[in-house]
Amino acid sequence: MENMMRAGNSRRASMACAPAGAMASRSEPLLRVDGLCVGTEHSDLVLDVSFDLAPGETLCLVGESGCGKSLTCLATMGLLSAPVKRKAGRVMFAGEELSGLSETALLRLRGREVSMIFQDATAALNPVRRVGDQVAEVLSLHEGLTSRAARDRTTELFEMVGIPDPRARLRAYPHELSGGMNQRIMIAMALACKPQLIIADEATTALDVTTQAQILKLLRRLQAETGAAMIFVTHDLGVVAEIADRVAVMYSGRIVELATADTLFDAPSHPYTRGLMACRLHAGTHNTGRLAAIEGVVPNPTARPQGCAFGPRCPQVTTTCVEMPALTAREEGHSVACHYPGDDR
Ligand SMILES: Nc1ncnc2c1ncn2[C@@H]1O[C@H](COP(=O)(O)OP(=O)(O)OP(=O)(O)O)[C@@H](O)[C@H]1O
Ligand SMILES: [Mg+2]
């Protein structure tokens, strides 16, 4: 844990080199998600999610499978598709309400000011088009570059994301490249127009540990250079320690704890966060390979228990927990949704 924290701290120190203006004051977030609710006609999948993000800042979304991380990202990008829709709440980006924009305006924004990197690059890339053309097209579309200028810039981008022999790789098809190389191409595409916000949903999960470390380092470097903010979804608390400024822990559609990475690792307050930390330590110390050591499973969104959804799995549950605990500030910048936060009983 100490090593993880050191890695996190050295990263935060490197953020001090971000360009002037990259770290905006907390009163002027680049992104503000306010009371976001997402679901279908019959289910509530994301409930009252609120957070903000300053330029240059990285927020990690963590939590078990099915707790609403991807839907939160997709809703932020305006990419939900039927039957899932935004039922309430607002998404403000650079002072503009995205939730009110037309599809045409959103298309202009995506890829240029906001980019998303998905888990499975090989599936996200077009299999029948050369990777160079796919990245060059983004540059022609959004930046109006000529085909020659777009190709030259694509070569530079490939070089920047660590693709060996970049000029030759322009002509490759996705199936001719490894998963790690395709992920780098996705990242090159996402960074092509120097977006202000990058949303990375499990962007490194499918990669081997060495490639993952290289990609994280690369993202951090590029972020420090361009001052981009990032939402980074991951299951891996080691990755969180490496990359996060702040962390939102999600459980069954809600944020249950929101804190700086330092606070979250030093003083996790929600029993669920503490459980996740214990899993991490347990897996690290005994090398069991088991990450989900919290008994039980995340409830089905259509059959949540009354009150706190974590109640049935919680070691500290009492009769009070049938009342939904509100996400409440414990101290500046640290909020927890629990009736007994940080309680060691
Ligand atoms: N198109 C859909 N229709 C109905 N339910 C959906 C749809 N997409 C997601 N869900 C449900 O919404 C909940 C949240 O899903 P989401 O994909 O956001 O979870 P996640 O936290 O990203 O999980 P994972 O870690 O597995 O990626 C889950 O219960 C999921 O089954
Ligand atoms: Mg997901």
Image (cartoon, rainbow, N blue to C red):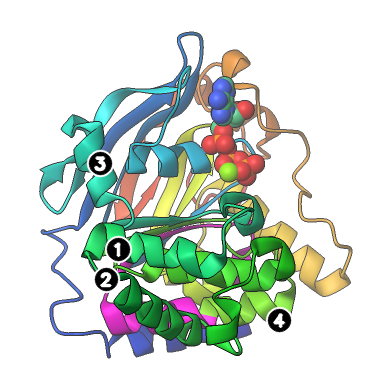
Residue 140: give its label: 1
Residue 106: give its label: 3
Q: Give the residue pinned by disc 2.
A: 146
Task: Look at label 1 and name its amino acid.
Answer: Ser
Mark 1 lies on a secondary structure that is: helix
| Residue 73 image position (x, y, % from top left) | 42, 44
| Residue 158 image position (x, y, % from top left) | 49, 80
Q: Nearer the viewer, mark 1 or mark 2?
A: 2
Q: Quadrant of the N terminus?
A: bottom right
The correct choice, above or below, for 156 with respect to 212 in the image is: below
The residue at 59%/79% (across/down) is 169
Foreground residue among 152 and 315: 152
Cα distance in 3D space between marks 3 and 1: 18 Å
Cα distance in 3D space between marks 2 and 4: 36 Å
In the image, the segment drawn in magenta is: 217-240
Q: Give the residue pinned by disc 4.
A: 210
Does the magenta portion include 220?
yes
Q: Is residue 130 left or right of residue 245?
A: right
- The picture quadrant where one finds residue 137 is bottom left
Mark 4 lies on a secondary structure that is: helix
The residue at 27%/90% (across/down) is 17
Report if residue 329 is visible in the image.
yes
The residue at 26%/85% (across/down) is 18
Mark 3 lies on a secondary structure that is: helix
